[in-house]
Image (spheres, grey):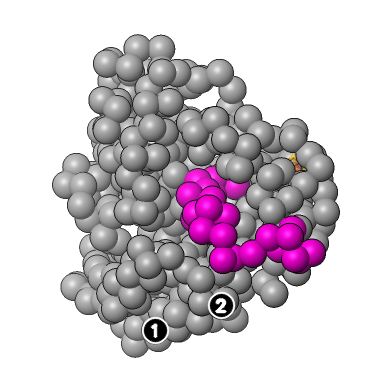
Amino acid sequence: MNISKYEEAIQNCRFCFMCRHLSAIGNVRFTEADTPRVRAAMLYGLRTGTNSFDDEDFVDALYRQDLSACCVHHCVNHFDENGLALAARADVVEAGKAPEAVKALAAEFSASASWKAAGKGDVAWFLDGTTAGDKDAVAAAKKLFAAANVAPKTITGGCIGKALKLLGFLPEAKAAAEKFAAFLAAEGVKTLVVSNPAAYDALTRDYADFGVKLPCKVLHVSQWILQAKLKFAKKPAAPVYPLADDFLRNYDGIDAPEKLLKALKAECRPFGTNDEETYNCGEGAVVLDRLHPELVEALAKYVAARADNPEKDTLAVASVYVKRALAKAGLKAVTLEELAASCL
Ligand code: SF4
């Protein structure tokens, strides 16, 4: 079973309640089943025969996890309860027990795995479907490219494997990854700039796990902006409350967003009661808004309740997913691209 690779997490997390406050879903459902300890205990029970994927409640708990990776990031031993949860989903799928809604979503993402390129050159920008849905974020990225005198080839299209991996469909995820890598090679891409942190994580970590080689260097847009050494003439008009990104901080450990905020001379204010938990409304789960929109709404309200002034504060986020989710609770967020473009 895939979960066998996470023995340390199963054995240790099932007795530990240290990171329960970082379980975003547990914080809005007030349920122990939505904490790493009880998920690990349930998966331990799977191996001892006291639990089974025939139990729909158990499978549902696995598919409503926010997957922020806050727990593993802040765990003193870094036991990978997040990797365990992903492995458990893969085991559910391999056992043929995936819920119908999950299967339908996976079929949709699998079928979407094709792309188009517009423009010339060996520098490309991957404009994923989520980012493409936000006109302001797209316009900001274009303004930044123009300021750097870079006219990237723009790549648009469907799933590059991330959503499929998160849903537990590993062969399909690997097939999408191989197809996208071949597409980039055929397009002669040498540098790929990526706006969506989930896509960045897929390209930099998942592809390596799958053994899929990319023909290009991959940069998150925050890394690219820093590297482009753009001249920012203005400071952000108002103070911002930066939210640490699930993928960029917890999965990938990159500090480009913080460096960019410094380069912009942004007045950054601390958000919420601590800087450990996620305020990203299920960003790490990528498709939580499709599987459980009611939970994303509850997560957004949880964030709004922690804002100093929910009607006026501006939150700085790394992804359009988060911006869109926070808007459900009336919160105003700007992406890093938008903030940087406003300083040109
Ligand atoms: S990830 Fe670490 S802190 Fe969280 S339950 Fe597991 S052992 Fe405890």
Tell me the residue that label 2 is attached to: 94
- Figure quadrant of the N terminus: bottom right
Q: Amino acid at mark 2?
A: Glu
Q: Amino acid at mark 1?
A: Lys
Q: Can the viewer see residue 250? A: no
Element on which disc 1 rests: helix
- Residue located 59% across and 65% down the image: 53
- Residue located 35% across and 63% down the image: 101
* The residue stretch that appears in magenta: 45-69
- Figure quadrant of the C terminus: top left
Quadrant of ligand 1 in image? top right
What percent of the width, then of the height, locates residue 185?
39, 84
Pick whichever, 230 or 301, lies toward us.
301
Q: Is residue 19 above or below residue 193?
A: above
Which one is in front in this view, the residue at disc 1 or the one at disc 2? 2
Tell me the residue that label 1 is attached to: 179
What percent of the width, then of the height, locates residue 259?
51, 37
For the residues marked 1 and 2, what is the alpha-carbon distance in whole angstroms?
Answer: 22 Å
Q: Is residue 312 above or below residue 261?
A: above
